[in-house]
Image (tube, rainbow, N blue to C red):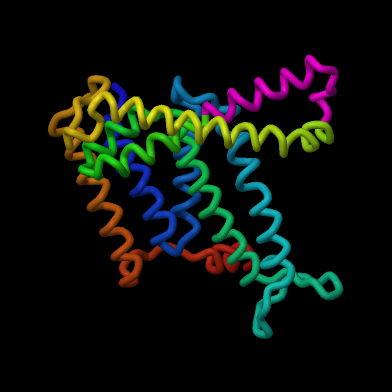
Amino acid sequence: MRLHPATELVLLGCALLLVYGVPSPLIPAAVLIAAAAGAAASPRVRFRSWALTLVVLAGPMLIMVGIIQGLFYPGEQADVLTEFGPAAVTVEGLALAIQLWLRVAAMVAVCALFAFGSDPSRAFDGLLTLRLPLSLAYVCAAAMSLIPLAQHRVRAALAARSARGWDTDRLSVRLRLLTGVLTGLLVTAITQLDQRHDALTQRGFGQSSHPTPAQFYPAGAGQRGLRWGAVLGSVLAVGASLAGLLPLPSATDLLGAFDA
């Protein structure tokens, strides 16, 4: 049985809290693995699209932090593993690079899993269940609706250019067309959102603080217990980590163990 959209949102927030609240690479690594398993098992998520999103968004971050922190860590007391002229691979630099990249990759992974596995209607109903203001819930749902709109408009624009003789299979041609495509996409998105808002206003949107959900979702004590348990568990884990009561190794400790 699929989770309630409010439960999915709570789990997403708790995952992000753990990723950035616990200073150990084991937590973001575990979240990344769990997101990969969820993307592979979900019938609503195409694993290839999820993995491509992760590579495109987190891949450049890996290269950047690997070069800046891994090779040019600014510390005189750093533990040098090997040197390449002015560059030096240090334990502290690698530890920081690993921690930063795992956090970014885990964040991208869970957000992409939610984005591909949900839809604006479910997100809107979930946000209302969590007692968010109606206007804020609408803005978040409208932002999610821009993703499929962008995909459709880009494919249509490239198909139109291809029909006019452009070789859209070449990357250089796509980059040349990118400015015009994005400009048209922005204008279309603003126009459609404005028209949608006017239509909703005419239908009485905002007159009720708790509109009727668009779909039926699983509810009950189990869903509420899962949400509260996830919130309490993540808050306690972060608090215990900050207080030094959660003995998880840092990236430096792990690298030191491998070096030993």
* Residue under the image location 27 percent in, 46 percent down: 230
**x, y (%) of residue 39?**
48, 30
User: Would you say 113 lies left or right of 127 here?
Assistant: right
Q: Quadrant of residue 8?
A: top left
Q: Quadrant of residue 209?
A: top left
Q: Nearer the viewer, residue 188 or 106?
A: 188
Main SS, magenta region, reads helix
Q: Is residue 167 highlighted in magenta?
A: yes
**x, y (%) of residue 11?**
33, 42
As drawn, 200 above or below 127 = above
Looking at the figure, which quarter contains the C terminus?
bottom right
* Residue under the image location 40 percent in, 28 percent down: 196
Q: What stretch of residues is rendered in magenta?
A: 148-170
User: Would you say 148 lies left or right of 135 here?
Assistant: right
* Residue under the image location 73 percent in, 62 percent down: 67
Residue 227 appears in the picture as rendered: yes
Looking at the figure, which quarter contains the N terminus?
top left
As drawn, 103 above or below 54 = below
Q: Is residue 198 highlighted in magenta?
A: no
Q: Nearer the viewer, residue 218 or 204?
A: 204
Number of numbered tags placed on the structure image:
0
**x, y (%) of residue 241?**
35, 66
View extreme (top): residue: 163
As drawn, 145 above or below 111 = above
View extreme (bottom): residue: 76
Residue 38 appears in the picture as rendered: no
Q: Nearer the viewer, residue 107 or 71?
A: 107
View extreme (left): residue: 221
* Residue under the image location 84 percent in, 23 percent down: 167
User: Would you say 101 lies left or right of 196 here?
Assistant: right
